[in-house]
Each structure stands twice: as C-alpha cells, then as structure tokens.
C-alpha cells in the first residue's frame, strides 16, 4: 500500500521539479554595474549578479555583443561576479554580462564605456597670425592640444577667467575664443586651460601665455611751433604730433606744400623739426603728414609767424562766489593785445610774485594762497584777506628773448574785508590810486554753481562813490516798477490829449464864428536848482571763463 502511494506521488514530484526549473530559467536576469567613462591607462571594475538564482552561476563579460573580456563563477547565493580591466584604447565599447545557471542563460543590461584620453600640451593659435590687428578687426583664438578627448576649455585674459557674463563681447565656442571687433582694451596676454573629468577625478593642462597686440588708428595730426634765441640769431622748431595711435608712425613736415623732412617715431607719437625763424616775418605755411601701414593723414595748415609782444596790457578781475553767496576766490586775467609767445609776470604792490616753482620765501615775499594757470596769464587768489589785498599788475615780454623790455598793465586794486567775505556779494572801491597810474578796475561778480558760474553782476566802480551790488531779483523788481510807472504816465498823457481835443471840438461846434486864439508857450517856473548829472566812463569787458571745480 505504501509503495503504491509512493508510485502515485512520483509524477507529481517530477512535474513540480520541471515547474521549478522552468520558473528559474524564466527569471534569470543578470544585472551589470560599472563606469561609463574611464581615463586611458586606469583600472575599472564591472560587477554582475543574478538575484535568487540557483547555484552555481557562471558569468561572462562580453564587449560589443561578441568579444569575451572576462569570466567568473559564483558559488554562493547572491554573490556578484567582479571583472577588473585595465583601460586601453580598445576598451571602448558596449559591455554586457551573460549568466548561466541550471542550464538557463540570461543577458544583462548594456553599459557603454568611453575611454577618456588625458589632455596634453595645449597651445593657443590665432586667426589671423601673428596676433597683431587694428581695432575693429575680427580675431579668433583657438586652444589646440597634442592629444586629449572629452575636453572642456577655460580662457583667461591677463590672469583673469573669461566668462560670458564678465566679457559679453567675447564669444566662447568649443575650443575657440572669438572677438568680432577688437578694441584697444582687449590687447594683452591670453592663455587657455583644457580639462576633462571622470567622476571625481579631473585632469587639467594649461597653455603658455599668448600675447595679442591691438593697434590703434592714428588720429589727425597736429602741428605747433616754437622759437628760441641763440646768441644774436633765432631758431625755430616745429612739432608734429597725434593724440592717439600705435607706433611706429612716420611724420613728414611740409613747408608751403613741399616736403622738408621725414622722421619715423618708434616709441612716441611726436616728431620735431628745426626750421628757420625770424620774429615778425612770415616763414611760410607748415603742415604735418602722418603715415602708417594703413593710413595717411594731413594736419591743418599753420602759418609760421612770430608776432612780438606789444600793444596794451590790462588786468581783469573776477570774484567767485559759492552757492550760498559767500566769496570764495578771485581770478585775475592778464590780457595781452599782441604777441605770439608772451611771458607773463605778476606784481603785488610793485613786488614780483614768485613763480610756482619758487620756494625761497626769505628772498621775496611770497603769497601763500595763489595759483597760476593758462601759461601764467591767469592768477587765482584762493584765499581772500588782508594779506592778499593790494594793487595787482601784470607785465609781459617775449618768452624767447629775456632782453626785451616789459609791457606793463595799469594797477588794479583788490581789497577784501571780513564783512565782504561773510555777506552777500558786495564790493567797495577806494579813491586811492598809485602815483602816475591810471585806475581801471573791471569787476565781474559770479556765483559759483556746479561746473559753471552764472554771471550775476558786472558793476563798474566809480571814483568817490560807493556802489552797492544788488541781486538780479532786485534789479528785476525795480525794472518792472519802472515799466509800470512809464505805462501809467503814458496813459495819463494820452487821456489828457484826447480830453483837450474833445473840448476844442465842443467849443467850435457851439460858436461857429469863433476863431481859436493861438496858444502861447507855457512857462515853467522852478524854485529848485537843477543839477547836471555827469557820467563817468569805465571799460567793462565781459569774458566767459571756465574754471574747473
């Protein structure tokens, strides 16, 4: 009976065993893990496992679906098979794991391995070459490497990294740095850095510095001349220069449209040419021509005539005020009517003021707060007080001949008190004049506003009188009142005229035979004395002068 039951169970056990084998074969799905990138020459590890498989399991690592790379056998359940490979150039491809267990075979997922070649010896090249271009021209820099793959690039200008945000006019594309229109500011040292990264490992290599030169177009040349005295003769010098450009630059001097001399400036943007010069004589018309490899420009003509100093010399005084109507400084201008190269000297109370470079205060009295400008033609008194008050004069002579006599101006009195300094703009003149000197005082009163001075007053100071300088608002009000008074008087006169004509018409209409008697001239009797108003003439010159603030 027992044997009979056992025989009956055998078919059932066989079917169960077959079902298990079919089930295991159907679920044999190996899983492959490993890197997708690896540096050339490094070692990598792939791992393959079949979860829940029967033992033993044989593993094979396949490349490109056919090339056997390695094998391994797992004798323990859920034990992965490990494959260690040294990466060569031929290691690149798609890897799969093939697992065999209990007569069943399964193939894993695919992993594509890329072999990264480390970068070596990057260098910068340019188009055009050599990298010497004029501003506004295109320039492309390339970062080329001897070997390397999967590279990224970083560019540096004068040791600072270039990014699209910090340098919007530079375009980064792959290994190229493009400049559509170079500027002078983009001249300098460039270098590139090439790098590649695998997981947390980065291989970097940098190029050497690459110098880019941007040439600047020269501007229109200018010409000037000077004169000096050597013994009894004179010597002239013509200067040709340009304000911008890149050397070398060739300068040529043309005198009356004929080239006299040519000079190539390699380190500067100027050239000097000696010429014959005699004061008072026309030595011709000079022009400068500048030549570069891409440009040729000509200056404006300049007549070589030296006019000796002569004529009238006078001083103009301007007081400068701050925005709150406080006197801040005074400006004295020396006006020389004739002279090409005047040398101006200033005197205070007949004592010569020292030059800006003169520091020996023991020999000459020195004015502690003053400044000279406009080739000594303008004297600024930056502090106004009793020390700076007095009679100012300027004198001029030819700067190239120290033996020439001085041409002097009349003295101008500058006297400032504490009351004037701390009050609204007000000036008082004095009747004191130096012996045998004509008193000419032209005062321009200014308010100092940002970057400009608004001219408020230009009074002429009369002798033996005191002039109160009013504001422009008061002058406007007085003028309006005077205009209204004039209109009122005019209206009254017109009304009287019409009223008299109407009265005469009425009398003539009522008395036709009446003949109008001739009117006698009215007589006016005045009990007071009439005083003749005498006017005093004074010279007032208005000159707009810009003063840097």
Image: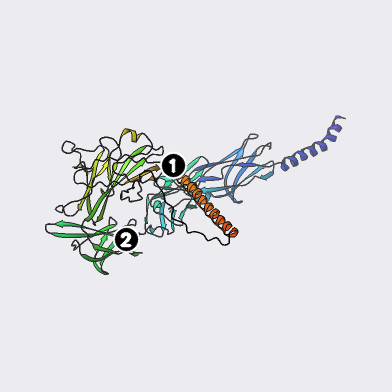
Which quarter of the figure is the C terminus placed in? top left
Q: Which residue is mark 1?
A: 474
Q: Nearer the viewer, mark 1 or mark 2?
A: 1
Give the secondary structure at mark 1: helix
Crowdedness of circle 2 by 10 Å Cα count: few (<14), some, many (20+)? many
Q: Quadrant of residue 351?
A: top left
Q: Nearer the viewer, residue 470 or 12?
A: 470
Q: Where on the picture, by quarter, is residue 310? A: bottom left
Q: Quick one: 433 or 50, which is closer to the camera?
A: 433
Q: Is residue 230 above or below residue 86?
A: below
Residue 221, which numbered label?
2
Instruction: From the top left corner, tell me how far across and down residue 105 is, in percent.
Output: 68, 45
Q: Which of the labelled discs sits on residue 546, or is there none?
A: none
Task: Give residue 428's quadrant in the image.
Answer: top left
* Mark 1 or mark 2, earlier in chain: 2
From this viewpoint, which residue is outermost toward the top? 2
Q: Position of residue 458 (x, y in %)?
A: 36, 46
> What's the distance in space between the residues labelled 1 and 2, CA to CA?
52 Å
User: Could you tell me residue 293's position as x and y percent?
Assistant: 34, 64
Q: Are marks 1 and 2 in contact (CB under 8 Å)?
A: no
The quadrant the N terminus occupies is: top right
The total of numbered circles placed on residues is 2
Q: For this view, does 81 lie left or right of residue 462?
A: right
Q: Which residue is nearer to you in this view: 290 or 457?
A: 457
Farthest right residue in view: 1
Q: Kindly tell me whether residue 40 is visible in this rendering.
A: no
Q: Report the front residue among 545 and 471.
A: 471
- SS class, disc 2: loop
């Amino acid at each position: 009976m027992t044997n009979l039951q056992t025989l009956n169970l055998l078919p059932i056990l066989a079917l169960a065993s077959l079902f298990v084998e079919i089930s295991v074969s159907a679920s044999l799905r190996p899983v492959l893990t490993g890197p997708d990138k690896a540096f050339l020459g490094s070692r990598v590890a792939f791992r393959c496992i079949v979860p829940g498989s029967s033992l033993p399991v044989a593993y094979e690592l396949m490349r490109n679906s056919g090339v056997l790379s390695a094998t391994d056998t797992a004798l323990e359940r859920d034990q992965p098979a490990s494959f260690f490979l040294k990466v060569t150039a031929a290691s690149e491809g798609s890897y799969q794991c093939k697992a065999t267990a209990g007569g069943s075979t399964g193939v894993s997922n695919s992993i594509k391995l890329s072999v990264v070649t480390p970068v070596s010896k990057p260098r910068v090249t340019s188009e055009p070459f050599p990298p010497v271009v004029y501003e506004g021209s295109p320039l492309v820099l390339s970062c080329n490497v001897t070997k390397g793959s999967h590279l990224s690039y970083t560019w540096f200008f004068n040791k600072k990294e270039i990014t699209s945000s910090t340098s919007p006019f530079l375009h980064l594309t792959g290994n190229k740095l493009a400049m559509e229109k170079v500027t002078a500011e983009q001249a300098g040292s460039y270098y590139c850095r090439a790098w590649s990264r695998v997981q947390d490992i980065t291989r970097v290599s940098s190029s050497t510095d690459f110098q880019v030169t941007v040439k600047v177009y020269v501007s229109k040349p200018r010409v000037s001349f000077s004169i000096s005295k050597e013994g009894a003769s004179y010597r002239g010098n013509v200067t040709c220069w340009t304000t911008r450009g890149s050397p070398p630059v060739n300068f040529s001097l043309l005198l009356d449209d004929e080239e006299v001399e040519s000079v190539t400036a390699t380190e500067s943007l100027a050239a000097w040419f000696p010429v014959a010069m005699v004061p008072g004589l026309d030595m011709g018309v000079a022009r400068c021509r500048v030549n570069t490899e891409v440009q040729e420009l000509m200056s404006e003509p300049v007549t070589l005539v030296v006019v000796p100093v002569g004529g009238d010399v006078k001083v103009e005084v301007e007081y400068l005020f701050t925005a709150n109507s406080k006197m801040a400084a005074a400006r004295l201008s020396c006006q020389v009517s004739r002279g090409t190269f005047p040398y101006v000297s200033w005197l205070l109370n007949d004592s010569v003021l020292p030059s800006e470079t003169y520091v020996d205060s023991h020999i000459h009295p020195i004015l502690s707060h003053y400044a000279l400008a406009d080739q000594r033609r303008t004297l600024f008194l930056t502090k106004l007080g009793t020390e700076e008050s007095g009679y100012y004069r300027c004198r001029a002579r030819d700067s190239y001949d120290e033996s020439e006599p001085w041409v002097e101006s009349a003295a101008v009195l500058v006297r400032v008190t504490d009351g004037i300094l701390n009050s609204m703009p007000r000036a008082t003149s004095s009747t004191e004049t130096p012996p045998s000197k004509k008193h000419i005082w032209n005062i321009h009163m200014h308010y100092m506003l940002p970057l400009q001075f608004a001219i408020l007053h230009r009074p002429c100071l009369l002798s033996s009188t005191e002039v109160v300088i009013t504001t422009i608002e008061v002058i406007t009000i007085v003028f309006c009142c005077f205009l209204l008074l004039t209109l009122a008087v005019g209206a009254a006169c017109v009304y009287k005229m019409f009223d008299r004509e109407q009265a005469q018409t009425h009398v003539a209409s009522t008395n036709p035979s009446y003949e109008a008697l001739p009117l006698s001239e009215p007589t006016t009797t005045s009990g007071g004395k009439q005083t003749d108003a005498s006017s005093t003439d004074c010279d007032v010159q208005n000159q707009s002068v810009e003063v840097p603030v």
